[in-house]
Image (cartoon, rainbow, N blue to C red):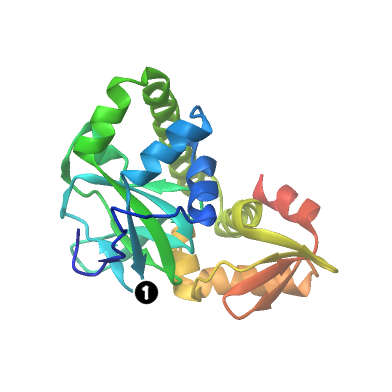
Amino acid sequence: MPSSVWPRKRSCVAWHTNPVEIDAVRKAALFAPLNDHDAQALLESMTPARVPRGRELFHEGDQGDSLYVITEGKVKLGRRSSDGRENLLAILGSGEMLGELSLFDPGPRAATATAVSDVELVGLAHADMTAFLSTRPEVAMTMLGTLARRLRRTNEALGDLVFTDVPGRVAKALLDLSERFGKPVDDGILVAHDLTQEELAQLVGASRETVNKALADFTSRGWIKLEARAVTLLDTERLQRRAR
């Protein structure tokens, strides 16, 4: 495991499962077909770890041989071009997986995973997952479905870059973040995304200045309210129309 991650050793004699971890693992699409007994067995073979905000879990090009499930916090996946520019591919939260490609094709990581908040996660080595899948083909099928959905989202994102203007992409990104991280409040939906303005711009594939202009426009129209590393969506219907 990378030096930026510090596993918490579990006792091999008397280990008690953290309920938060069980809940998060069960939310991951990969483990949806599992009954409680199988989920417990799988979790016992996983290694828990903590990644402080700003630290990397793994770096693009590192040799990858483990899958991770986030149990708390948020992780960003990004790539850097040869001239130093960064592109933010995704923001992942509790119950979501990363590094799953290494289970089918161990090799260099295709992106860098960085904690955007303090993160708790559990990791599963390639050998352990292979052994687990050999007796549970339904889990393998679920994983393939998960990979297919991720590929579909990637294709949609590429289409948005070509066919959708920046304000439309910003509106769509805010709605997507609200579906996964939003919490109802009195005046709308509070989305604590934990992203800087630069990271939000990277997520939609535009300059910070252009994205800030779109956010300012949405604010003036009364669609959103900006806060520190968060936004409250006040009018999701208007945002949905703008995202089309």
| Picture coordinates of residue 18, whole percent (x, y) | 48, 56
Which residue is located at x 54 percent, y 43 percent?
27
Q: Amino acid at mark 1?
A: Pro
Q: Where is mark 1, residue-wise?
A: 52
Which residue: 28% across, 62% down? 9
Q: Position of residue 238 (x, y in %)?
A: 78, 54
Question: In this rendering, is residue 132 above or below 64?
Answer: above
Between 98 and 200, the one lying in front of the other is 98
Q: Quadrant of residue 181?
A: bottom right
Tag 1, which secondary structure?
A: loop
Q: Is residue 216 visible?
A: yes
Quarter of the view holding residue 120: bottom left
Towards the viewer: 110 or 128: 128
Where does the N terminus fall, quadrant-wise?
Answer: bottom left
Q: Quadrant of the C terminus?
A: top right
* Up/down of 12 relative to 101, above or below: below
The residue depicted at 65 percent of the width and 54 percent of the height is: 175
Q: Position of residue 20 (x, y in %)?
A: 53, 56
Q: Residue furthest right?
A: 186
Query: Which quarter of the figure has residue 231?
Result: bottom right
